[in-house]
Image: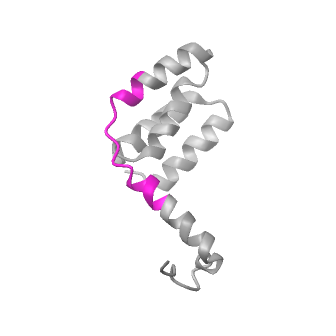
Amino acid sequence: SQKPLYLTLDIIIAIKQNNFDAAQKAVNKLTALLPNELLPHLMYIDANFSKLNSLEYANEVMNYLKTQQFDFNDFYLTVAHTECTKRSPSHLAGTTSCPKN
């Protein structure tokens, strides 16, 4: 079993090289590892639907997203981190904890 970071890098590299077969294999593994996370599914969409025309792309994405069960923890954690960083840029460097409001 590969680690999510390495699978993510495999996907990005494969897409940049137009190797969509390799990207699809890696993204299938990543979505199996992290089925409720948003980012792997966005990468799945890119790897599987990016060659479609606009109308087909929109239809496929809509149908795909309807079947997913996201918990959105990754989204909310990113927003919380961004808000914290806005208040205290030194938090990014890990030198301080996020200050309270």
For the point 49% across and 48% down, the residue is 7
Q: Residue furthest bottom?
A: 95
41 or 26: nearer the viewer: 41
Q: Residue furthest right?
A: 17
For the point 62% across and 35% down, the residue is 15
| Quarter of the view holding residue 47 | top right
Q: Is residue 79 left or right of residue 17?
A: left
- Relative to 73, does residue 27 appear above or below in the rendering? above
For the point 54% across and 71% down, the residue is 84
Verify whether residue 6 appears in magenta: no
Verify whether residue 69 appears in magenta: yes
| Quarter of the view holding residue 18 | top right
Q: Which residues are magenta?
A: 63-78
Residue 2 in percent (x, y) is at 42, 52
Q: Is residue 3 visible?
A: no
Most common SS among magenta residues: helix
Residue 39 in percent (x, y) is at 48, 45
Residue 41 in percent (x, y) is at 45, 38
Q: Residue furthest front?
A: 101
Q: Is residue 81 visible?
A: yes
85 or 42: nearer the viewer: 85
For the point 56% across and 45% down, the residue is 10
Q: Is residue 66 left or right of residue 92?
A: left
Residue 89 in percent (x, y) is at 65, 76
Q: How many numbered discs?
A: 0
- Relative to 54, does residue 31 appear above or below in the rendering? below
